[in-house]
């Protein structure tokens, strides 16, 4: 009797663990070295802040204005190596800085030749928020993200589904940090059929949606006559 009880208990525990594993949110690493990532606890995914500040990138340009020394006003462009060239100061590395950090960097650089300079930085040309759409959409590519855009709206912006699309398993990839992506699956077919778009997520800058192929599109375009019977009655 005791053996039967212990055996039944182990089965229940095993089923519970399997259920939890199946319902866990899918998170996939970008890095291919998953073994070392699992061994190192510091590589576990940590979610980014809710409203991250924009960071200066190569190719960005901005105006640098001096309230008390307008002769130093200038427009600069970030070079491929992350440096900018400033009047009277020379080269300064600014890539990957936020605007407040950039303002402090410029203040420190000009503090050597000006007395407590008052500097205002205005972004002029920068990498605008975007999302990408890939897979079975009519116009895959990179799209500018303006305002609130939901998943279904993003698919429409990409031209909608093509004939090979699997509407019920649209994947949305979202960056968690520099090493990890979060992946979620959405049944867009069911959302559109029911008219209930409460589960339609809003996209964030850098999101990527992927529409896979349906099962029928994986059938070879040319098959021998002897193999047609294996697919049953195929409509012309």
Image: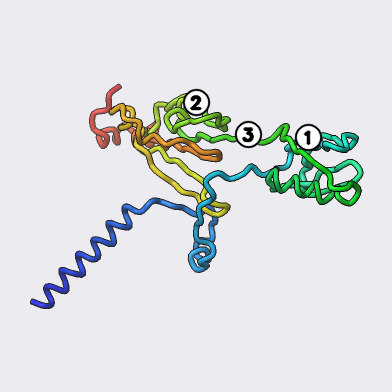
Label 3: few (<14), some (14–19) or many (≥20) C-alpha neighbours in 10 Å: few
User: Where is residue 228, by image quadrant?
Assistant: top left
Label 2: few (<14), some (14–19) or many (≥20) C-alpha neighbours in 10 Å: some
Q: Where's residue 79, x and y in %? A: 79, 42
Query: Is label 2 in a helix, a strand or a loop?
Result: helix
- Name above or below for residue 176 compared with residue 7: above
Q: Is residue 71 left or right of residue 209?
A: right
| Residue that numbered label 1 is attached to | 63
| Residue that numbered label 3 is attached to | 128
Q: Is residue 230 left or right of residue 57?
A: left
The N terminus is located in which quarter? Answer: bottom left
Query: Is label 3 in a helix, a strand or a loop?
Result: loop
User: Where is residue 78, by image quadrant?
Assistant: top right
Query: Is label 1 in a helix, a strand or a loop?
Result: strand
Q: Where's residue 29, x and y in %? A: 50, 54
Ranked by sequence position, the earlier of labels 3 and 1 is 1
Looking at the image, which is closer to me, 129 or 22? 129
Disc marking residue 157: 2
The C terminus is located in which quarter? Answer: top left
């Amino acid at each position: 009797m005791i053996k039967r009880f212990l055996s039944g208990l182990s089965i229940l525990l095993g089923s519970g663990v399997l259920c939890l594993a199946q319902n866990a949110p899918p998170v996939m690493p970008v890095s291919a070295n998953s073994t070392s990532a699992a061994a190192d606890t510091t590589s576990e995914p940590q979610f980014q802040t809710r409203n991250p500040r924009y960071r200066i990138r190569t190719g960005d340009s901005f105006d640098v204005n001096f309230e008390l020394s307008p002769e130093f006003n200038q427009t600069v462009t970030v070079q491929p190596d992350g440096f900018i060239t400033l009047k009277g100061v020379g080269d300064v590395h600014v890539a990957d800085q936020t605007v407040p950090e950039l303002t402090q960097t410029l203040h420190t650089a000009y503090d050597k030749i000006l007395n407590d300079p008052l500097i205002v930085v205005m972004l002029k040309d920068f990498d605008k928020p975007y999302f990408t759409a890939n897979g079975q959409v009519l116009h895959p590519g990179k799209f500018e993200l303006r305002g609130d855009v939901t998943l279904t709206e993003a698919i429409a912006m990409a031209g909608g589904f093509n004939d090979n699309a699997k509407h019920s398993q649209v994947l949305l990839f979202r960056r968690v940090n520099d090493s990890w992506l979060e992946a979620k699956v959405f049944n867009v077919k069911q959302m559109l059929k029911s008219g209930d778009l409460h589960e339609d997520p809003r996209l964030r800058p850098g999101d990527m949606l992927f529409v896979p192929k349906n099962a029928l599109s994986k059938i070879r375009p040319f098959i021998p006559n002897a193999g047609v019977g294996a697919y049953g009655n195929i409509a012309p």
